[in-house]
């Protein structure tokens, strides 16, 4: 059995985003920085308690304390939860709903109580074009999936039932009987292995089975339609096999080459980030060019009021947000931001989000459908 590390990241999944657009408030959003290791891991719990007091005051004005606050208070006592954090924590609650997300983002301390959840600071992990990426370390002995940003990386769970090594894959086989296995990849290419009982043929079949299970798990964890860069780490042969099996369009051509088994998460990040940065810059430039082409035609704007109206009417195709630059400072604040409303309306009407890495870009821009 392969050794598994405890994942310390959560995907902001499509189910939650759907809930965020249709669930009636009041919504409570608590965003705060956290630490992965050391004594500071539990310090975030005290900060969270202080933020709950601010949220309680805001809820009292809306008569929502009794319905929304108790589940948030219960989280304070969960010591194991606070011991296993990432760089930032986002906690959301609405009537009948509580979700927590450990994220690779150093979030500023914010409390928001309103009709919509506080999503703008999370744009880097929500966007189709943004500063986040994924790394899939492939080998016969150890498969790992990571989510990364410019400054951090953390492991994602592939699911308890997903094998992550060849020796976890059960294939009934008889070395005395001719073995033949042919399989059609989801991408349309045929990956075929023929064997006659040889160890290499059996190993090839086992590896293909493993990678098929991994491809299915990646689709479930990241979403089949995810567009942020997915970087493969491993030997070229393994990368080619997985590409053919997976058929995912967001797999970056360039790989982190070599055996990834002995690479730590940090070492993988150091090798993967330059590849991700090149891919992200290309996506960012293409989107900026599209926006600039449409400025002056009525199909693009940086005026928040115009964008808000268009989002409510379902006319926003792509919402471009500048990456948040506010850093944690230990001072929780109550926040009300119209951009959160725009994000909710954009997602509700199947628009997409993108984050710009250009610090000189307007804070909010939009490309309209018409």
Image (cartoon, rainbow, N blue to C red):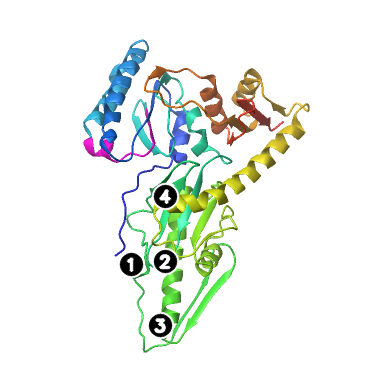
Q: Tag 3, which secondary structure? A: helix
* Residue 346 appears in the figure: yes
Residue occupying image coordinates x 41% and y 79%: 202
What is the distance, in whole Å, between disc 1 and disc 4 at their CAs? 26 Å
Residue 53 placement (x, y as % from top left): 30, 17
Residue occupying image coordinates x 50% and y 53%: 271
**Residue 294 falls within the magenta-colored stretch:** no
The disc placed on residue 266 is 4
Q: Nearer the viewer, residue 40 or 14?
A: 40
Labels 3, 2: front one: 3
Q: Nearer the viewer, residue 298 or 38?
A: 38
Q: Nearer the viewer, residue 179 or 208?
A: 208
The tag earlier along the polypeptide, 3 or 2, is: 3
Does residue 126 lie above or below 328 as drawn?
A: below
The disc placed on residue 199 is 3
Residue occupying image coordinates x 26% and y 24%: 70
Does residue 25 lie above or below 357 as drawn?
A: above
Which quarter of the image is occupied by the C terminus? top right
Labels 1, 4: front one: 4
Whether residues under marks 3 and 2 lie with C-beta atoms below 8 angstroms apart, the answer is no
Q: Tag 2, which secondary structure? A: helix
Whether residues under marks 3 and 4 lie with C-beta atoms below 8 angstroms apart, the answer is no
Residue 339 placement (x, y as % from top left): 54, 23
Q: Which residue is mark 1?
A: 168
Q: Residues within 10 Å of mark 3 (few under 14, many from 20)?
A: few
- Report the magenta residues as a range: 79-92
What is the distance, in whole Å, between disc 3 and disc 2 at their CAs? 16 Å
């Amino acid at each position: 059995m392969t050794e598994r590390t405890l994942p310390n990241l959560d995907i902001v999944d499509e189910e939650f985003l759907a809930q965020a657009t249709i669930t009636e408030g009041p919504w409570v959003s608590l965003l705060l920085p956290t630490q992965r290791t050391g004594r500071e891991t539990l310090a975030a719990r005290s900060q969270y308690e202080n933020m709950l007091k601010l949220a309680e005051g805001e809820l009292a004005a809306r008569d929502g304390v009794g319905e929304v606050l108790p589940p948030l208070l219960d989280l304070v006592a969960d010591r194991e939860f606070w011991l296993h954090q990432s760089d930032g924590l986002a906690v959301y609650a609405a009537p009948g709903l509580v979700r927590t997300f450990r994220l690779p983002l150093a979030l500023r301390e914010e409390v928001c109580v309103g009709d919509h959840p506080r999503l703008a600071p999370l744009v880097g992990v929500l966007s189709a074009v943004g500063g986040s990426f994924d790394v899939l370390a492939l080998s016969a002995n150890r498969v790992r999936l990571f989510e990364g940003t410019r400054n951090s990386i953390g492991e994602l769970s592939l699911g308890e039932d997903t094998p992550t090594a060849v020796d976890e894959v059960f294939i009934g086989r008889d070395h005395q009987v001719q073995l033949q296995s042919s399989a059609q990849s989801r991408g349309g290419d045929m990956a075929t292995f023929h064997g006659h009982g040889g160890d290499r043929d059996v190993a090839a079949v086992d590896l293909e089975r493993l990678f098929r299970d991994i491809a299915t798990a990646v689709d479930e964890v990241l979403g089949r339609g995810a567009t942020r860069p997915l970087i493969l780490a491993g030997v070229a042969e393994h990368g080619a096999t997985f590409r053919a099996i997976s058929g995912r369009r967001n797999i970056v051509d360039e790989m982190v080459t070599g055996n990834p088994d002995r690479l730590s998460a940090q070492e993988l990040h150091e090798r993967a980030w330059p590849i991700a940065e090149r891919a992200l810059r290309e996506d960012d430039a293409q989107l900026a060019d599209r926006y600039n082409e449409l400025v002056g035609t009525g199909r693009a704007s940086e005026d928040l009021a115009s964008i808000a109206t268009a989002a409510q009417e379902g006319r926003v195709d792509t919402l471009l947000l500048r990456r948040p630059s506010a850093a944690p400072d230990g001072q929780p604040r109550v926040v009300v931001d119209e951009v959160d409303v725009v994000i909710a309306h954009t997602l509700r009407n199947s628009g997409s989000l993108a984050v710009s890495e250009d610090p000189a870009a307007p804070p909010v821009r939009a490309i309209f459908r018409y």
